[in-house]
Amino acid sequence: ITELFKEISSQLKKNYNNNFFYKGNPNSKIMILGDYPNDEDIRNQEIFSGTRGQLLSKMLSSISLDKEKYYLSNIYFDKDNDKKNKYNFYKDILIKHVKIIQPKYILFLGEISANFLNNSTKKLLDIRGKWNSILISKDKFITFATFDPELLLKEPENKKLSWEDLKKFKNEIFNN
């Protein structure tokens, strides 16, 4: 994993610490992927920091997931608006990342991450709360999408939908 993050830092020409790339257990069967860091994450050099991170922690603990039970990262590691030109770079990085972690389940937090590997443009309200899967090489990963905590802070009316998603996710991961 360390080599992957060194590669990302050198290609982005930024010096990030490991807290910026991930939290949790790299040996977990659950990988949680957000879209990209917000300003607070960049300032703190920590993934899902501040109020967004606090809400995510509450969300995950509400379904009995603590840091030892998941691995948390992002699709993008910068807020650069030039994501279209960096798509292939990040897709290659994400594929390497998933191959290293080898999760059974991937929980996508947000529309960008949920659509990233299948190059889709579906709206989060259409894909959230539904089970899917992706193939990377010959490995199949079970996927599920819900809201990014940052969106829930801006649009609290979606918290009920997110809670329904999290209960569905919990039922699957703890029963299989």
Image: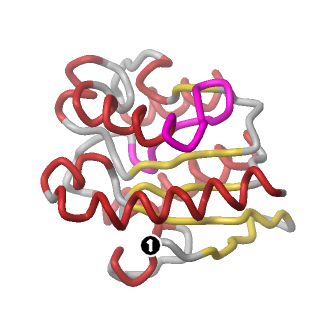
How many numbered marks are there? 1
- On the image, the x and y values in percent for residue 44 come to 26, 17
The question of residue 99 being in magenta is answered with: no
Image point (55%, 76%), residue name: 130
Residue 26 seen in render:
yes
The question of residue 67 being in magenta is answered with: yes
Q: Quadrant of residue 111?
A: bottom left
Front-most of residues 78 and 102: 102
Q: Quadrant of the C terminus?
A: bottom right
Tell whether 176 sits left or right of 20. Answer: right
Determine which residue is flagged by label 1: 128
Mark 1, residues whose alpha carbon is within 10 Å: few (<14), some, or many (≥20)? many
Q: State the SS at label 1.
A: loop
Give the vertical position of 161 relative to 66 (above or below).
below
The colour scheme of the drawn protein is secondary structure
Tell whether 70 sits left or right of 9. Answer: right
Region in magenta:
61-76
Image point (20%, 20%), residue name: 43
Tell whether 134 sits left or right of 148. Answer: right
- On the image, the x and y values in percent for residue 96 come to 68, 47
Residue 100 seen in render:
no
Q: Amino acid at mark 1?
A: Arg
Q: Quadrant of residue 64?
A: top right
Image point (51%, 34%), residue name: 61
Image point (25%, 64%), residue name: 158
- On the image, the x and y values in percent for residue 159 come to 29, 58
Front-most of residues 8 and 24: 24
Give the vertical position of 17 relative to 94 (above or below).
above
Give the vertical position of 172 relative to 2 (above or below).
below
Q: Quadrant of residue 168?
A: bottom right
Tell whether 154 sits left or right of 3. Answer: left
Q: Quadrant of the N terminus?
A: top right
